[in-house]
């Protein structure tokens, strides 16, 4: 069985209950047979593999078999080389700000968490500015 959101939109909806792992380091990582996606479920999950996109949307579901084991070192090297080619062609940002934002987004498990962190930092900056005004007024 191999279902994708693009090809099997209505049939894949029955797997929407499959959630992704909260931490990236604890994800399964099994590679999808037909695309360059990896399983985003927890490493100790049972049942089918699932790849999620932004906002936790389910993109693909596939049954595990012997080809779906953890990616080999060669596969990871090929994937890194392909990423380097995309950066050289300008398809992917490579500046220091882009790398930093990529690391920040990589640590957070969802865009909602990112928005809460930004909100918290904004409120903290506002609180510090109010405190500074109070202290400097004395």
Image: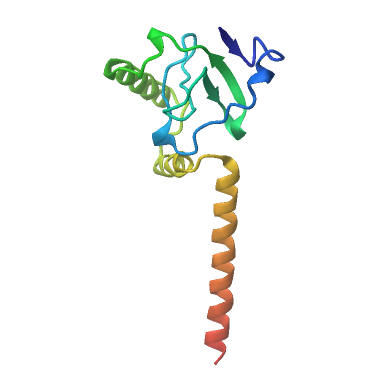
- Which part of the image, by quadrant, shows the N terminus? top right
Q: Residue 33, how many percent across, how many down?
A: 46, 9
Q: How many marks?
A: 0
Q: Looking at the image, which residue sits at the far right?
A: 10
Splitting the image into 4 quarters, where does residue 75 fall?
top left
Q: Residue 110, how many percent across, how many down?
A: 55, 40
Q: From the viewer's perspective, tell me whether residue 79 is left or right of residue 16.
A: left
Residue 55 or residue 77, whichever sits in front: 55
Q: Is residue 123 above or below residue 46?
A: below
Q: Is residue 101 above or below residue 66?
A: below
Q: From the viewer's perspective, tell me whether residue 75 is left or right of residue 55.
A: left
Q: Residue at x 58, y 26 (%)?
A: 18
Residue 42 or residue 74, whichever sits in front: 42
Q: Is residue 6 above or below residue 127?
A: above
Q: Residue at x 53, y 21 (%)?
A: 50
Q: From the viewer's perspective, tell me whether residue 5 is left or right of residue 94.
A: right
Q: Residue at x 42, y 28 (%)?
A: 43
Splitting the image into 4 quarters, where does residue 82 fall?
top left
Q: Looking at the image, which residue sits at the far front?
A: 46
Q: Residue at x 42, y 41 (%)?
A: 103
Q: Residue 124, how many percent across, how many down?
A: 55, 66
Q: Residue 36, how many percent across, how many down?
A: 46, 16
Q: Looking at the image, which residue sits at the far left?
A: 73
């Amino acid at each position: 069985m191999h279902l994708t959101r693009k090809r099997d939109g209505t049939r894949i909806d029955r797997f929407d209950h499959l959630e992704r792992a909260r931490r990236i380091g604890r994800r399964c990582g099994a590679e999808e047979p037909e695309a360059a996606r990896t399983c985003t479920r927890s490493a100790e999950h049972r049942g089918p593999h699932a790849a999620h996109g932004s906002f936790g949307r389910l993109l693909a579901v596939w049954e595990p078999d012997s080809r779906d084991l953890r990616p080999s070192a060669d596969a990871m090297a090929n994937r890194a080389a392909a990423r380097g080619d995309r950066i050289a062609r300008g398809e992917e940002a490579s500046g220091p700000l882009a790398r930093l934002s990529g690391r920040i987004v990589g640590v957070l498990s969802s865009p909602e968490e990112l928005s809460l962190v930004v909100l918290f930092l904004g409120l903290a900056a506002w609180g510090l500015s109010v405190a500074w005004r109070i202290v400097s007024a004395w």
